Amino acid sequence: MSTVTAAAPSYNELCRVWSRLYRYNHLASIVGWDRNAMMPPKGNDARAAAEAELSALIHRTRTEPRLAELLRAAEQELLTDVERANLREIRRDWRDANALPEALVEAKTLAGAKCEHAWRSQRPANDWPGFLENFREVVKLAREEAQLLAADSGLTRYDALMDRFEPGVRAADIDRIFADVKQWLPDLVSRVQAKQRDEKIIAPVPPFPVAGQRALNLAVMQLLGFDFAAGRLDESTHPFSGGVPEDVRLTTRYRAEDFAQSLMGSIHETGHARFEQNLPREWLGQPIGVARSYGIHESQSLSFEMQLARSRGFVGLLAPMLSAQFGAQPAFSADNLFRLLTRVKPGFIRVDADEVTYPAHVILRYEIERALIEGEIEADDIPALWDEKMQAFLGLDTRGNFKDGCMQDVHWTEGAFGYFPSYTLGAMYAAQWFAAMRRATPDLDARIAAGDLAPVFAWLNANIWSQASRWDTPELVRRASGEALNPQHLRKHLETRYLGS
Amino acid sequence: MSTVTAAAPSYNELCRVWSRLYRYNHLASIVGWDRNAMMPPKGNDARAAAEAELSALIHRTRTEPRLAELLRAAEQELLTDVERANLREIRRDWRDANALPEALVEAKTLAGAKCEHAWRSQRPANDWPGFLENFREVVKLAREEAQLLAADSGLTRYDALMDRFEPGVRAADIDRIFADVKQWLPDLVSRVQAKQRDEKIIAPVPPFPVAGQRALNLAVMQLLGFDFAAGRLDESTHPFSGGVPEDVRLTTRYRAEDFAQSLMGSIHETGHARFEQNLPREWLGQPIGVARSYGIHESQSLSFEMQLARSRGFVGLLAPMLSAQFGAQPAFSADNLFRLLTRVKPGFIRVDADEVTYPAHVILRYEIERALIEGEIEADDIPALWDEKMQAFLGLDTRGNFKDGCMQDVHWTEGAFGYFPSYTLGAMYAAQWFAAMRRATPDLDARIAAGDLAPVFAWLNANIWSQASRWDTPELVRRASGEALNPQHLRKHLETRYLGS
C-alpha cells in the first residue's frame, strides 16, 4: 500500500513492519529456492544456520510486543475498505505467529523433524510400530496446538487448524460437501472404469531426451502465459513453485522414459506461477497482496493441469508440440494422447492418482485426521480405519501395507493436520471456475481448441488473481462464481469428460 | 571459534554478534550471486528493496552502541593468541563500520552511484568534461573519508584508505617496491617485444561451442582441485567469484569465437575459490576465518592463472584437453599454445593487459590516486598525468583518448581509492610463493608438467589458505616465504618466462 494515511499512524506503522517482513521473506524464498535447486551438498550446514538466523529474525519481528497495542489502536483508526482488509490480514499473520507459546512451536518442530527423519527409512521398511513411537508425540503436540488455537479463535480444534490454510472454511462445510461426493464418487469410478476397459491406448516410445523435454515445457509454459522476464524454470529432486511474486521460480524433474510427468508437473506449477505473477502490484509488500489460501492456490494449478490441459481441445494443441520435439509417433495423435492423459485407475498412492479417484484419497484422510485431532480416535487406530475406507471408496485392500497406506504422506509425519482438504477444495473450485467461464464464454472449448486461451486467463485474472487476499475464501468464491462452493460442478466436469454425458 | 571462554564474557558476546553477521552476510552473498547469475529482469526492484533491507540490518548490527564498550572490555580479558587475533579482526570490521558518520557514507555512496551511472554513457562518448562534473564531488567526499579514517587510525590519508584493502601495507612500502619496478620494467617490455617480434603464432580456428567450453572449464577446474560438492560454475555478464566459503559460486561468460577468455577467467576464479574452500573450518563464522586481504586473494587467482596455468608444463596439460573438446588443430600444439598465452603487447586497457605490462597500468594509477587523495593534484590534472606516464612506461600516446585512458576503470568512478595496488601486490606475492615452492620442491616444474599439482596445492594450503586472517599481510608474507615482499621474484619470473634467462 503506497498511500500513507496521516490519520492512521498505528496502521501505517504496522504497514512498515509488514513491508520489512515482506523483504525478509523475499530473502528466505530465494535462498530456499537456491537450497533446493542450486546448492551443492557441502553448503548445507552453513545454509541451515543462515536460514535459521533469518527465521529467528522474522519471528522476532512478528512477535514484537508493541504490535499488540498497534493492532488495537489501528482498529480505531479511519481506514478505507481495502486498508481494513489489509489490517485483517496483518492480524491473521500476527495471530499465526503469536497464538502459540514458543516452547510448543519448538517442541512440535523437533518432534515433526524427528518423526520425518525416521520415516524416510521406516516407510520403505513398512515399519508401522517404529513409526508409531515417534508419531504419537507428533499427534499429542498437534492436539495441544489445536487446543490453544481453538481457545484463541473460538473455533473447534480442527477448524482452528484448517483456518490457517483455508480462511473461513469450516469442517461443517467440508462434511456437507464430502458427504455429497461420497454418494456419487464410487459409482462414477466404476462406470468410468467400465467405459475405459476396452479402450486401446498406444504407449509413447521412449527415450525422451531431457533437452527436448525442457524445450517442450518452456514452449507450453509460454503458451500458458508464464512471464519469463519475471521467473524461471529449473530442476530439483522435489518439484515446487518458489521465489516471490516479482520473480517466480518453478522447478521440475526429468525422466528420459516419461515426458508426461515433467510436462504435466510444469503445467501444474505454471498455474501457481500465474497467480503469483498477476497479484496486484499496488498491494505487493502487504499481507492483502498475498495469494489467498492453499485451496485457492491449488484451484489455479488444477485449473491449468486438469481443467485446461487435459481438455480435449488443449490436448489437440499439445499433440503437434510433442511431435515437433520428439518426432512423430502413433502415440502422439490427439485422440490417443487424450486417452492417455485421462486414464482412470484406482491405486494406493495419492500423488499418483488421476482426477477422478483423487477426492477419495482426500476424503479418507480428512475423516481420519479430523477424528484424530478431536480426540475421537488414537494414532493406533489409523491402519484399520484406513483399510476400511480404502475398501469402501476404491475397493482396494491395504491390510498390512502401511508403506503404501497410512505411512505414504509427509503431512501427518511432520504434524501438518488440516491441510489435506485443500487439495480437493482446489479441484472443486477449479471446476466451479470453468463452469462460470463457460457461462461467460459459451464457445470456450472451441476457443481453447483453436489455441485462444485469452478468455481463460482474463476470467482468472479478473476473479482470482487480482483479488489476492482481499476477501476470505467463501466470499471470494461467491464473488467469483455467484454461488458458494458447490461440488456438483466437479461431478458435472468428471461426468462430461470421463463418461461423455 | 567453537570454544567459549567462561572468563571472557565480552569477547564471547562479540563472537556471537559476529556469528550473526556471518549468517546475514551468507544471505547477502547468495542473493547477490542470484541477482547476477539467475534473476530475471523484472525481479530487480523487489530484489533491490530486499537487499537494501538486509544491508540496513547488517549496518545496524555492526554499529550497535554497546559494541564499543564490549570491545574495550574484551581487550582486558584473558584470551589465547588466536582469540586475540580474532578480536583484532573484529575491531577492524567494527572500525570499518563505525569510523565514518553515516551522512558521509550515504553522500559518498550516492555520489559514486551517480557518477557511475552517467559514466556508462560518458565513457563511450569520450566525455571527460561531463564526467569531471560528477567526479569532482566523488573526489571531495573520498578526501573527507580519508581524512576521518586517518584521524581515527593515525595513518596518513592514503594509507588509511589502503589499509582497508591491504592491512599493514603502507604507501612507503609501495613507493619503494614500485620504484624498483619502474627501473627495470620498461626495458624488460622492450626486450620481450623484440624477442617475440619474429615468433610465428597459429591462431585457433573458431567456433568453440559454448557446451564444449563449459565442459573444458569444468575439466580444468577439476584438475585444479575445485570442490564441486562445495561450489558451482555458472554464467554472468561480468564474471565474479561469489558465494560463501562453504559454497563458492564462480561465474564466467562464453564467446563462441574465443575459448581462452573464459578458460583463463575460470582458472583465475578457481584460484580465488580454492582459498575460500580451504579456509580453516574451525574459524569459519568469525572474522579471523575470512580470507586475508584483496592482495593476498589476488595472489591466489594469479598463482593459478599466471604462475601455474601459463607455465610451459601446465600448457602441456591443457593442449590435449583442448583437442579433446574442440578437435585437433595446429594451434593446439603445446608450443603454439604457450606462445599464444604469453604474448606481450603494450595496450591502453588494464583488464586486457598481459602479465608483463600489467604492473605499468597499476603503478600509473597508484601514483595518480595517491597524489589526488593527499591533495597534491586535482581531478582536472589527471589526463595530462595519465598521458605523461603512459608515454614513459609503455610508450603509448593517450592524448584526447579519455575513454581508453583515465575513464576506463569503474574504481575511481565509484570512489574506490587505494585498491589498485592490490593487483600488482597480488602478482608479486604469487611470484614470491612460487619461488618459495621451488626452493621446497626443486623438481616443481617437472611435476607440474607430469600433471602432479599436489606440491602447489599443499604449499598454498599450508602457507596461505589455512592462515586466513591470522596475521596482517606483511607478517603472513614473512611467515609464508621467509622474507618481506620482494619485487625481485616477479622480475625473475618474468625474465625467466619471457626472455628464457
Image (spheres, coloured by chain):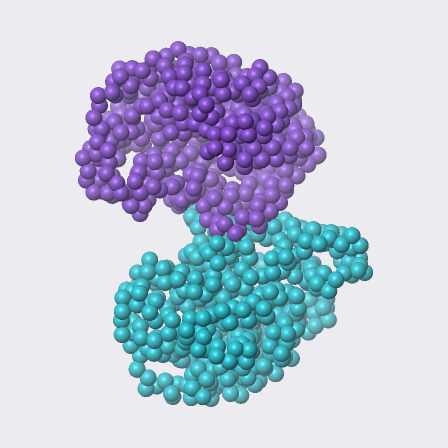
Chain colours: A purple, B cyan
Q: Is residue A452 above or below residue B295?
A: above
| Horizontal relation, residue A69 to residue A478: left or right | right
> In this rendering, does residue B345 appear at all?
yes
Callout count:
0
Question: Residue at point 37% right, 59% down?
Answer: B214
* Residue A209 point in image, percent of width and height: 29, 45
The image quarter in which residue A436 lies:
top left
Question: Residue at point 45% right, 88% down?
Answer: B501
> In this rendering, does residue A448 appear at all?
no
* Residue B356 point in image, percent of width and height: 46, 80
* Residue B279 point in image, percent of width and height: 58, 61
* Residue B25 point in image, percent of width and height: 59, 53
Question: Residue at point 27% right, 43% down?
Answer: A207
Q: Is residue A102 above or below residue A191?
A: below
Question: Residue at point 46% right, 84% down?
Answer: B496
Location of the N terminus of chain B by quadrant is bottom right
Q: Nearer the viewer, residue A263 or A118?
A: A118
| Horizontal relation, residue B131 to residue B341: left or right | right
Q: Nearer the viewer, residue B111 or A271?
A: A271
